[in-house]
Amino acid sequence: WTYPIRRPGDGSYALDIARRAGLGLPAAHTPLVFPMTHDAQILARYWLQAARTVLEILATGRDAVFLVEGDACTYSTFTYLVRSLRALDGEIEVETIAGVPSYHASAAHLGQPLAESDETLAILPAGYGVDTVERLLPEFDTLVLLKVKPLLDDLIDMLERRGLLAHSCFLEKVGTPDERIVRDLSCLKGEKVNYL
């Protein structure tokens, strides 16, 4: 197994998910460092190092599994790892197994569909900014915002101003023992929330 960590010595959220599911950590396991930064040069260096590490595993004749937190094709470090692997070896075989994105798990936990019939749905990282979110609100029936941590207070203000707080919900660490569902977003003002 390989799995992402933010820096050496850190735990892995993806690995914790596998362990909570009852999977035992195999003897052969390797953490891969993917720092939380937007610096493209730093990221490229770590992606390349992770790809080289996986290639070393593959060169021994073993398969490598990369654990992800939700779905491997949705805002996942996996896509960068695969791109870097293929840049080093264009013949590499990759099998992607679909997972459950956090917004699907959230809708299931709420018992509320994301979209019905001809309704429209948009999913975006909140990092695009409150102005973008506000501009998209009239265009979509449902708007799913991910990674809201840095903009939460501004988003709450905007939703309140538009009369949408009663139609909004905040979910954190869905499907884990630390899961939190908050239907009254106003109580989150000024609070530090988790990245997930």
Image (cartoon, rainbow, N blue to C red):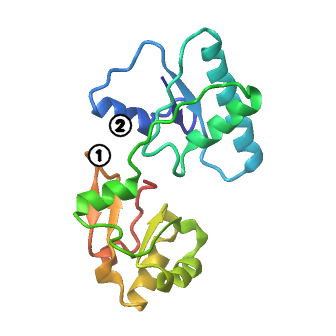
Rendered residue at 25%/45% (across/down)? 177
Judge whether 63 appears above or below 141 on screen. above
* Picture mark count: 2
Q: Position of residue 116 (x, y in %)?
A: 33, 71
Q: Report how far apart the C-alphas of labels 1 and 2 lie in the structure.
A: 8 Å
- Residue shown at 71% from the left, 32% from the top: 86
Q: Which residue is mark 2?
A: 17
Q: Tell me if 20 is positioned left or right of 101 in this view.
A: left
Q: State the image coordinates of residue 56 (x, y, percent, origin top left).
A: 66, 16
Closer to the camera, 171 or 122?
Answer: 122
Instruction: Tell me residue 131's x, y (percent).
Output: 58, 81
Q: Residue furthest left?
A: 111
- The tag on residue 176 is 1
User: Does residue 192 sit above or below 90 in this rendering?
Assistant: below
Residue 51 coordinates in the image, percent (x, y): 67, 28
Q: Residue 86's mark?
A: none
Q: Amino acid at mark 1?
A: Thr
